[in-house]
Image (spheres, rainbow, N blue to C red):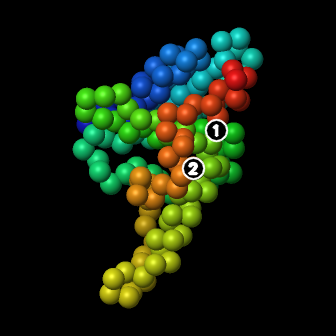
Amino acid sequence: MSQLNLIGAAGEYYVCAELCRQGVLAVLTPKNNPLFDVIATAPDGLSSVTIQVKTRSVKNKLGWKLGVDIANPDKSKGQFVVLVNLHEKQLPDFYVYTCEDLATRVSAIYENYISTPKRDGTPRKAVAFRWFDEISFAPDDHARKNDWSVIRKVLNLI
């Protein structure tokens, strides 16, 4: 298993552990599921959500490198994304989004990037990925840090 796969797996396990700590039943899906990584269910089993996990390694100072499909909110209506920021000597930070909210944010940042010419004045070329990092965070993004309430509400736990 590559280092990148181990980092991704660590993020998925951290998400499950945090949800379980909060009284939510959370389980990993089989590897390489293209739509989601975690299924979270209320203890009574009456409601559940799916979660895609994107993990940023300790050494990564650039942010989360996301596929272009992350900007397509229709593909994953009602699903959540948790961005995991690993730290060397403390628990990770979690940024919890609906897919729709993250798609809106990532699309806006990319549109701003692509519409801004390079330093030499030439236009930027389209890229097959999207960066999302704290430099681009708005106050709403910062407020999502370790705030699981959006998932807990859907599971009727608030």
Q: Which amino acid type is shown beneath numbered disc 1? A: Gln
Relative to 133, 27 lies left or right:
right
Relative to 9, 113 lies left or right:
right
Q: Is residue 146 above or below residue 125?
A: above
Q: Secondary structure at mark 2?
A: helix
Q: Nearer the viewer, residue 12 or 157?
A: 157
Residue 121 picture location, percent across and down: 38, 88
**Spatial CA span between label 1 and label 2:** 19 Å
Q: Secondary structure at mark 1?
A: loop
Packing grade of label 2 (10 A; few <14, some 14-19, many >=20) is few
Residue 118 picture location, percent across and down: 37, 81
Q: Which amino acid type is shown beneath numbered disc 2? A: Asp
Residue 114 picture location, percent across and down: 48, 74
The quadrant the N terminus occupies is: top left
Residue 140 is labelled as: 2
Relative to 120, 136 lies left or right:
right
* Residue drawn where x is 50% and y is 16% of the image: 21
Can residue 35 be seen here? The reply is no
The quadrant the C terminus occupies is: top right
Residue 123 is labelled as: none
* Residue drawn where x is 42% and y is 76% of the image: 125
Residue 79 is labelled as: 1
Packing grade of label 1 (10 A; few <14, some 14-19, many >=20) is some
**Camera-side mark, 1 or 2:** 2
* Residue drawn where x is 48% and y is 22% of the image: 18
Can residue 78 be seen here? The reply is yes
Q: Nearer the viewer, residue 149 or 106?
A: 149
